[in-house]
Amino acid sequence: MIGEADRKWLRDLLADRVVFDEPMARHTSLRIGGPADALALPATVDQLIRLVCRARQKGLPLTVLGGGTNVLVTDKGIRGITVGLGGIATPVRLAADNRGGVLVSAHAGVETRRICATALKKGLAGMNFALGIPGTLGGAIRMNAGTAAGQMAGVLTAVTVLTPGGQVKRYPRWMLEAGYRRLGLPVKEPFVILEAEIRLTPANRDELYSEARRLMRRRTASQPAWRPSAGCFFRNPAPDKPAGMLIDQAGLKGAAVGDAQVSTRHANFIFNAGQATAGQVLELADRIRETVRQRFGIILEPEVKIIGET
Ligand SMILES: Cc1cc2nc3c(=O)[nH]c(=O)nc-3n(C[C@H](O)[C@H](O)[C@H](O)COP(=O)(O)OP(=O)(O)OC[C@H]3O[C@@H](n4cnc5c(N)ncnc54)[C@H](O)[C@@H]3O)c2cc1C
């Protein structure tokens, strides 16, 4: 819990851009999560820097939240300060590079779908793989979000990061270590991705739109996008062994603990059928892990980030 003195400096710094004891169920795509002690939405990068430095001086834990579409927040909620970047408004900038490509720079709080839409409108290839991935650019980079058609690391050329010490640093792509649903940065946690630069290439707009329609049709047919979820819950243990296939073959489609349910459309989606708690989701996830382990000898690891007090 944060005390009255901390509430005061947070209010002084952010005015109405900080709320206290805020239920995180309001800020996650699963619609689950207990209260954040303080949820801060700075309006400028300068405010964000001052917030991070002050939190560090005071020894308050800092949690960064993007669109909340790949997280499970525990029922006890998040201690310390949770910071979102959605309040910092900046335009998406485009500039030609000297190799016939276009560099797109955007603030990390921008929604990924805005980058995809800008690319399509301008006839730029490279971002169609991310169509339909919810959340922010910062979250997509952190998670190296992707599909069979591509991943963020494939288009990223640089990221600008706020270090825990309050320094702003720019890292070119070669300094970043791309893995399956993770991007390693040479900086200590908790850092905040502030901005990203990606490189796209001019292409035939009609072909881009037709590819976009095909990818979106495939997504709509395979995912229960209308259900509150955090996307795929578990990482695929191997490319030829997708977690969804293993969960399906283990007979777990439709399995439930309370209102936490395994989708019958895509077995790697756990969704909230109404009033699910994080505890129910975790119990269901444990049951899935144990059944898959017994059946196939494979241990599933969560892709979703579990954050908050346990
Ligand atoms: C219906 C649905 C479909 C999905 N489909 C896909 C898919 O096809 N492919 C895929 O890869 N994912 C998919 N996801 C998962 C999720 O949308 C992506 O991982 C997304 O990019 C996460 O972005 P976010 O802003 O919501 O991040 P959050 O969920 O808010 O955060 C995810 C992690 O990133 C960190 N983070 C967020 N922003 C920053 C920042 N600025 N600086 C530092 N750290 C940060 C958080 O601390 C957290 O650890 C899907 C989710 C849903 C609900």
Image (tube, rainbow, N blue to C red):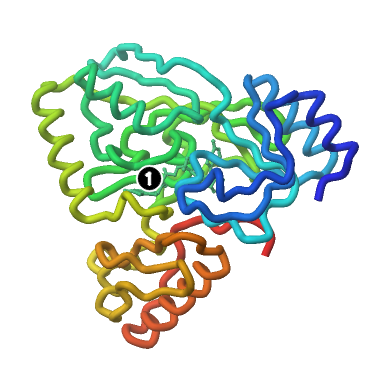
Asked if disc 1 is less than 8 Å from ligand 1, the answer is yes
Q: Image height check: is 259 above or below 164?
A: below
Q: Position of residue 108 (x, y in %)?
A: 49, 30
Q: Residue at x 53, y 56 (%)?
A: 72
**Left or right: 65 with respect to 116?**
right
> Which quarter of the rendered image does ligand 1 occupy?
top left
Q: Image height check: is 255 above or below 91?
A: below
Q: Residue at x 39, y 83 (%)?
A: 291
Residue closer to the observer: 64 or 11: 11
Residue closer to the observer: 309 or 24: 24
Kindly state the secondary structure of the residue where label 1 is placed: loop
Q: Residue at x 56, y 50 (%)?
A: 25
Q: Image height check: is 46 above or below 135?
A: above
Quadrant assignment, res 170? top right
Please, what is the three-letter code of the amino acid marked with disc 1?
Answer: Ala
Quadrant assignment, res 20? top right
Most extreme residue toward the bottom is: 294
Most extreme residue toward the right is: 5
Q: Image height check: is 112 above or below 290?
A: above
Q: Residue at x 52, y 19 (%)?
A: 89
Residue closer to the observer: 211 or 181: 211
**Left or right: 212 with respect to 176?**
left
Badge 1 density bin: few <14, some 14–19, many ≥20, Cα 10 Å: many
Mark 1 = which residue? 145
